[in-house]
Amino acid sequence: MTINPCVPLRAGVGLCAIVLLAACGSSDAPSRQALADNNMDPPPPPIGETVDGITYDRVLESDVDGEAIAFTIHEPEQLVGGESYPLILHSHGYGGSRQAARPAPDSFIGQFLVNGYGVLSLDERGHNDSGGTIRILDPALEGQDWLQTLDWAEANLNWMEYDAAGPDTTVGGLGRGNPVMGAIGGSYGGGYQHLVYAIDPEGRLDALAPDITWHDLRYSLFPGDVFKTFWGTALSGVGNQPANNQDMQLNQALAQAIATNTVTDENRELLYQHSLRSHCEGNNPFTFGNLRPIDAFYSQSQLDTLFNLNDLMGNFDCISALGGDVRMMTKAVGHGIINGDSGDNCGSLGRQAATLAWYDEKIKGQAGAADSIPNICINLGPEGADGVLLDSLPVGGVAAPQATATAFVLQEGSPQIAYSDLYTAPAGGAVLAGAASIDLTMSDPTGVNALGDPILFVGLGIRPAGGNDPLLAVNNQYRPFRGFDSFSTELNGVTARLAEGDTVVLMFLASESTQFPGSGTLVATPVDLVADVELPITESATAAP
């Protein structure tokens, strides 16, 4: 076998370094990139000297089960000897992979590098180059992988910044204080941020910026005990697509849900334990102590039909209650069958630029850098330019006339919709933003309440002034209800601008084919429906800048 000494080898690091010294290039020492590519720590530049940052991969052996943990280090665009830099964690969406190539300077991650941050991008367990199986961010597995990776970063990134006033992590007994860290990522890449925040005993994350992520996976996938078939099937597809390796328990659970529209208690508990809600409610054994206050910037899409505004509101309420600075924005782009103009903005507030400004203030300490981010910026429709500033995103508010439907027949595939008028916008219009509260009774017209398995879908619609009843719910949001029973809960959060004379209607649907195909009532079942609804209506709102 012929060995090219200028091609780094993973094994024999010491020998390869010697070969590099003797045979690669004309300098007396190998480059920082050559050392990094040979699994050696690239040294910092001499004091006062500036060098270009490099990108390199690392693979750890999991302390839990020996599986590979693959990640990439992107040093800041330039390193100055004697200076230190904060670290931004990054991870991908479900079925995706880490940012392995050096990102372009004008990209989202690239802008962090240009502005003096380092980035660590990780393949989650079961994804791409990392071993094991996908467990939807299990604290016992993916969570431990992350903690081990952060320990590695402290031990090996000689340019990483520390806060001497923060808790001492004592890596190597050096007493450097707490590392300065933030995190970015959307969907699955938002969920890991909550996981690390909740379970890390050293509290290394200083601020969060989760995008389009969940609060409670039980709600996200099984709202009202009805399986969200479209998204469950889509997630299963990408989770099992090479080079991904979805866990057998998840595959079995998804197959059962598709076949029977049910979930076992064990799998329901798995979904809960892998959600921020379990930590917020003090029901997760991996939570380190009590959740600490932390600053968080949340972004979500009102058109997101996987993780909707209720997920945003749950995360926002939980973290806000702890006392940190927590802000939110909504936008068009998300997990949506319909994504409007796919804008990543609310008014002039762009999510990516806002996230960089957020960290400039929260972990770089640049006073006022995040002043452009309002507490709550709400995008009102499919076009990102139409946004308003609100004090809160409420549940309920304006009481509406009682809605009813008699002998309404539920059946999978039926196009039937029953409508009840709830509210008509006055002169000057109004804003619908938040989640409607609902008290619903679904009963058997015969009074038996014993036959059938009725599944009803409920949404809010808008009938334009002088127009016809809608065929689609606002933001494509539908909440299922299952069984002859009484329910007191909230509908899916929505946002919309109402013109004078527009009427908000309650929509009772016999089935819903875009998100819940096959999850409707299998045997035609008549029901009587009575609903009391309160709407999140604001009749005056400040336009977003």
Image: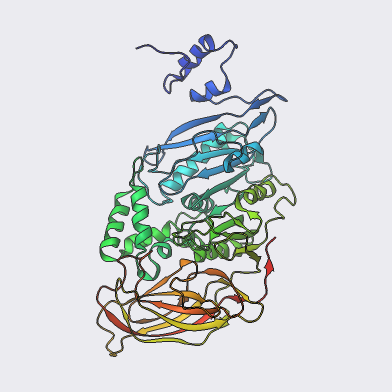
Q: Is residue 201 visible?
A: no
Rendered location of residue 497, percent (x, y): 59, 71
> How many numbered markers are drawn?
0
Who's the residue at 40% across and 43% down the image?
125
**Nearest the eye: 314 or 386:** 386
Where residue 532 sits: x, y (%)? 48, 84
Q: Quadrant of residue 349?
A: bottom right
- Residue at the limit of the structure toward the front, as seen here: 466
At x 58% / y 14%, what residue is drawn? 29
Q: Is residue 179 above or below residue 425?
A: above
Which corner quadrant of the image does residue 216 belong to?
bottom left
Image-based side of 121 in relation to 377, left or right:
left
Q: Can the viewer see residue 334?
A: yes
Q: Position of residue 402 (x, y in %)?
A: 48, 87
Q: Quadrant of residue 12?
A: top left
Q: Where the N terminus falls, by quadrant?
A: top left
- Left/right of residue 220 with respect to residue 312 in the rendered view: left
The figure's colour scheme reads rainbow
Whether residue 396 is situated above or below residue 23 in the rendered picture: below
Where does the C terminus fall, quadrant-wise?
bottom right
The residue under the point 44% across, 81% down is 419
User: In terms of depth relative to the viewer, which is nearer, 519 or 385?
Assistant: 385
In the image, residue 43 lies at what x, y percent?
60, 24
Considering only vertical position in the picture, is 494 above or below 197?
Answer: below
For residue 106, side relative to residue 286 (left or right)? right
